[in-house]
Image (cartoon, rainbow, N blue to C red):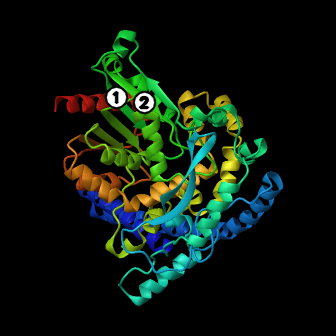
Amino acid sequence: MHIATCVWQEKKQEEGRRRGAMGAAAASGNKGEYWTRASLLALLAAAGGALNCAVSFLVFSLLDLLDPVLCLVYKVVDYAVEAEWKPCYCSSSSSSSSSSSSSSPSPAPAPGTTTKVVRLTTSAAKTNGSHNKALQVEDVSDTLYVRASLLSDATRSYNNNKSGPGPASAAAPSLTVSPAIVAELIREKADRAPRTARQARPCWSDCDCKLCHSWSATASRSSHLYVHVQSPPSPADNSSADLEAVVFIHGFISSSVFWTETVFPAFSSAARARYRMYAVDLLGFGRSPKPADSLYTLREHVEMIERSVLQRYRLRSFHVVAHSLGSVLALALAVKYPDAVKSLTLLAPPYFPVPEEEAGAATQYVMRRVAPRRVWPPIAFGASMACWYEHVSRTICLTICRHHRVWDRLFRLFTRNRMRTFLIEAFMCHTHNAAWHTLHNIMCLSASKMEAYLDVVAGQLACKVALFHGRDDELLPVDCTLAVGARVPRARVTVYEGKDHITIVVGQEKLFAAELEAIWKAAAQD
């Protein structure tokens, strides 16, 4: 599948280059020049594509071998340092896997279905001196458990091509829950003694600095997200009944500073006097709680936003601005609070319409699109390592996030560029557990959520919908936003030429702040 995808993408790029050369030649009136230039571009494109595919196959085949080796290494180190084995998802779907679920062979799920696990949760509130415990059914992505190696994926793709067209055979097996194991899990957790001070500390491979772990100091902090609130400067304005609320949601491995260091200072004085703005750090990122036992599911993320922003600040109506993965959470909020949302602004939403032949393995399809296992472009290489290899990605977090203070000082020393420094800060303040589960349980699982959400927005919500995307986005192609626009016909779609996944905001802060002010003003006039 990987090789086939590479070839298809390179052919598409080659066709675009050929058309560009044809237009240039037609303008100059020199057909011979066109054929020479087109042939040269086609040759270079084919060579570059072949080299990219070959190197990618070699690199990711080696990573397929490296990941299980790292699994054994981390199990030994975890046991030596933490005195307990850390669960992982290396087991196949036919054997026991995570600490809160059991999987067994079963038929492939029907199109559109999701995997559910039962887990025991502990609430932050206490009753009679003890924590409340309850069973919670969670939607999780099967990509946590089922991630085919590159070689087996390519072999399966070759066999499917030989057998001809037909139903997709890539459907991932569903996960079922064993009642006996769940009962044993509940009994074990209910009888477990309180965690010692040593066990309550962050994992040895996670950062324990004040910035990353301050949330654990009190129970009130651990039950709420970190929220940066920008209110009107005048106390009199703060009490005005005319103030409108705006909730900003960042994307994957980012934080609230993606907004507070860019568009917040760029808003006009009139907007600052009229809007109270709330920029959250999502669960597991920035200064927000990073619980080690969380699965970072859509439910958990949305409930934390509700508790930390909507309920805490008593918001009855609000605008929503979201970037990338945060767009999935924004849509979930809009669907849950249809009468409260005044406008919905999504930047680079991760929507990949699933082809009919891939419907039985929609999450796998989205994972291959987000993380195509290619070494070029670099952002695709990074996404592929983070998504496909649990222990390779943990090693990256150990190297970068565990020592983010050192990296931050180095970047400040060598760049002298605050704009790029805050992006590094946002990129590094998370744990592997948070990043791994959020990527799979939000981004990959969006395959089973996005279409239903967009149908509700299109048919049942009356709020303004605005979509923005950068033409040069190499992580989430502009087709994602165009597909959302096709799904929600009233949405206003804006594509910025020469902008990518980050520079859609960073570098044009005043322009984008003006766009947001216009959207909010138009929503107030309806």
Image location (x, y in percent) of residue 404:
67, 39
Which kind of residue does numbered mark 2 sit on? Answer: Tyr
| Residue placed furthest toward the bottom | 163
Task: Say which quarter of the image contains residue 510.
Answer: top left
Three-letter residue code for mark 1: Ala
- Label 2 near label 1: C-beta < 8 Å? yes
**Residue lying at 80% horizontally and 61% vertically, measured from the top left:** 76
Location of residue 420 in the rendering, given as x and y in whole percent from the top left corner: 55, 34
Quadrant placement of the C terminus: top left
Pointer 1 or 2: first along the chain: 1
Q: Residues within 10 Å of mark 1 (few under 14, many from 20)?
A: many
* Image x and y of residue 22, in percent: 28, 61
Q: Relative to 35, is 179 on the left or the right? A: right
Inspect this view and state whether residue 377 appears: no
Q: Along the line of sight, which residue is nearer the eye, 343 or 428?
A: 343
Which residue lies most toward the front here?
Answer: 128
Up/down of 450 relative to 112, above or below:
above
Residue drawn at x 44%, y 84% is 160
Circle 1 SS class = strand
Q: Please tell me whether residue 409 is drawn above or below residue 78 in the rendered image.
A: above
Q: Which of the 4 image quadrants contains residue 406?
A: top right
Residue visible at 58% across and 33% down in the picture: 221
Query: What residue is shown with label 1?
Result: 245
Tell me, yes or no, if residue 525 can be seen here.
yes
Q: Position of residue 251 (x, y in %)?
A: 47, 44
Residue on which the image places disc 2: 278
Position of residue 220 in the picture relative to residue 273 (left or right): right
